Amino acid sequence: MSELKRIDIKEFVENGYLLEVNRQFFHRLGLALEVVGEEDGIFHLGGVHDARDDPEGFIFAESFDDIDIARAERVEQEFAEKDHYRLQKFGWFIQPIK
């Protein structure tokens, strides 16, 4: 098996993946994946915030105007492109658990 590539954490944030993984998955559960940007420009994963005892979970902002829609739409476009091939090859785009 060839060596797996890794995405730079700064790119992960800038391309909207952190936004969408939090918005679509973690926040609903009362969790939030944190990325820390250091003064030297290096980004790293900071951990997972836990507010599972809060029934509302996390939100990014009170107003939809404060969400970076362009980054979210970029990820949605990638989903659409990947989903087409995954559906064609496997018959699903999100792997079933059964």
Image: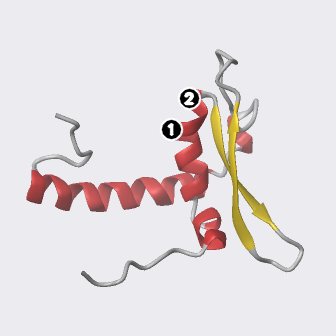
At label 2, counting other C-alpha atoms closer than 10 Å, the crowd grade (few under 14, some 14-19, many 20 or more) is: some
Residue placed at 64% from the left, 63% from the top?
13
- Point 10% across, 59% down: residue: 89
Placement of 36 over or under 67, stated as above or below: below
> The disc labelled 2 sits on which kind of residue?
Arg
Image quadrant where residue 50 sits: top right
Q: Quadrant of residue 45?
A: bottom right
Task: Identify residue for label 1.
Answer: 25
- Distance, label 1 to label 2, CA atoms, is 6 Å
Q: Could you say where residue 8 lies in the image, as x and y percent from the top left?
A: 59, 75
* Residue 3 on image: x %, y %: 36, 83
Q: Quadrant of the N terminus?
A: bottom left
Within 10 Å of disc 1 (Cα), the crowding (few <14, some 14-19, many 20+) is few
Q: Where residue 90 sits in the image (x, y, percent)?
A: 11, 54
Position of 10 relative to 24 (above/below):
below
Name the residue: 23% across, 45% down: 95
Image quarter where the C terminus lies is top left
Q: Seen in the image, is 79 located left or right of residue 93?
A: right
Between 81 and 3, the residue placed more toward the observer is: 3
Point out the residue furthest to the right here: 39
Q: Quadrant of residue 85?
A: bottom left
Q: Label 2 near label 1: C-beta < 8 Å?
A: yes
Q: Is residue 37 above or below residue 56?
A: below
Q: What amino acid type should be assigned to the residue bearing mark 1?
A: Phe
The residue lying furthest to the front in this view is 1
Q: Secondary structure at mark 2?
A: helix
Q: Which residue is mark 2?
A: 28
Give the left or right position of residue 11, taking residue 95 as reference.
right
